[in-house]
Image: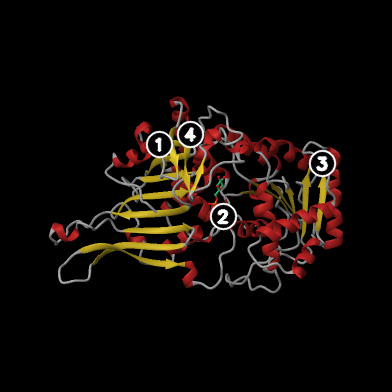
Amino acid sequence: MADSGATVWKNPLRDERDKRAPRIAGPCSMVIFGVTGDLSRKKLMPAIYDLANRGLLPPGFALVGFARRDWDDEDFGRVVHDSVRTHARTEFREEVWERLAEGIRFVQGTFDDEPAFEELAATLSKLDEERGTGGNHAFYLSIPPSAFPVVLEQLSRSQLAQPAPGRWRRVVIEKPFGHDLTSAKQLNEVVNRVFPEESVFRIDHYLGKETVQNILALRFANQLFEPIWNAHYVDHVQITMAEDIGLGGRAGYYDGIGAARDVIQNHLLQLLAFTAMEEPLNFTPDALQNEKIKVLSATKLIEPLDETTARGQYATGWQGGEQVVGLLEESGFAKDSTTETYAAISLEVDTRRWAGVPFYLRTGKRLGRRVTELAVVFKRAPHLPFDATMTGELGQNALVIRVQPDEGITLRFGSKVPGSSMEVRDVNMDFSYGESFTVASPEAYERLILDVLLGEPSLFPVNAEVELSWRILDPAIEQWAADGKPEPYESGTWGPESAQEMLRRTGREWRRP
Ligand code: BG6
């Protein structure tokens, strides 16, 4: 067991009982596979610098890159430096950078190159001596899933996956975790052959977002919301993840994957789980994961799927004042690609709390604007003692969690329009992070990388959650594959007509965020 026997590192300066104190990682190193990729450059390296800058990494921390490129330590150091200068969230401080740079190493090799893994092992043990990383290593697989088996095999063969008393080994896996339930099971088997489940950290970066964690605070730290968080009061829930960007440059990953696999299977179903789950006994990883597993087990697609789901593919259109091409003209995509760039599904959660309350999930590229939000839409008041003309403009109450951008929460309710007559209209009451807090939110990857180094698994979906999410989604993906082509929608709009129709059929409308 890769984590067993490892003594948990305790920061001597921290009072463990005070959960507000900064959590600082103990001695360790992180190895990144796939260090030449976009994710490494734009998210992982900057997040590591930001953690160092915030004083949350140990002084002897080491970062090791592994890739095919003909680089030495200095070359790799320059790549990290450029990525930090361009993408880090916090200000650049020379002394922080220099301390971090001392622990940067590069190992050149391909994933099936045994001697390269021997060299990696030698590099890590040298770092243990020189920098006091204590034999604690995290291996971050920012590589295509097809390369997982060979890298895991090499880690196992070179004893790098092997913990010993007092030192831990962990593996971090980026999505996609398979492309359906069967392949996810196979992937999990491969991973668990080398690393036991408690040493596997599956990244769903949405769980690293402050606004997503705040769903738990909103629901379980307050008296106000939980009493109405159920089928008696809630009409339906809408979860939207809209992006304005297209898929230029991402064909290799995205073609054949599509919107549902890319983000509904993971980010949106995790948002649903946070919204719909019961109160956990406490915030231990087990308690939280158990509640998510329970609610995902109760969740399924509403049928018939040709009426309750929709998918589309962006076509030419206008975005931000510029004309943009459709998916089929993006470089690298097959000219007859049936990959969907928009997907919407309707779910039910078969529990007493949610009986009869639909959860509508949608996501798309090249939509009107970038916004992720979760709207709990309430039923109308059972009786209105007003003349109908007074409430013509009154909609349904809604609580909207604005995940990004403009992070915050909006409560929408009816209010009297000032004047001598009685007229009621919707107004918004707002909480905004920017106005209420002076500290900026850390990037999701900062939080998650720190949690990996601390061995804190609460914010990482376990095997069972991944498999349940595929179980929920697979029937829709199968049906779409049988149906042929997704419906084209003009770039810069809010998606295909069939998605509007899907909600209209139920007497509802998508929100225009
Ligand atoms: C990733 C998806 O997981 O999330 C991308 O693969 C998507 O397609 C990205 O663009 C969006 O992340 P964020 O944090 O900008 O909402």
Q: Nearer the viewer, residue 496 or 141?
A: 496
- Could you tell which of marks 4 and 1 lies nearer the N-terminus? 1
78 up-or-down from 93: above or below: above
Residue to which mark 3 is pinned: 109
**Observer-nearest of 95 and 175:** 95
Secondary structure found at label 4? helix
Amino acid type of disc 4?
Asp
Q: CA distance from mark 1 to mark 3?
A: 44 Å
| Amino acid on which the number 3 mark rests in the picture | Gly
What's the image's color scheme? secondary structure
The first of marks 2 and 4 along the sequence is 2
Label 1 belongs to which residue?
A: 310
**Disc nearest the viewer among 2 and 1:** 1
Crowding at mark 3 (Cα within 10 Å: few <14, some 14-19, many 20+):
some
Task: Name the residue carrying label 4.
Answer: 474
Q: Residues within 10 Å of mark 4 (few under 14, many from 20)?
A: many
| Numbered disc 3: secondary structure | loop
Please tell me which of labels 3 and 4 falls first in the chain: 3
Q: CA distance from mark 3 to mark 2?
A: 32 Å
* Residue shown at 48% from the left, 28% from the top: 481
Residue 424: x and y in percent read 21, 63
Task: Determine the CA span between mark 4 and mark 1.
Answer: 14 Å
Q: Nearer the viewer, mark 1 or mark 3?
A: 1
Q: In 3D space, how far apart are the residues under numbered discs 2 and 4 (Cα atoms)?
A: 24 Å
Residue 1: horizontal and vertical position, in percent?
70, 47
Q: Locate residue 225 relative to residue 259 in the image: left or right.
A: left
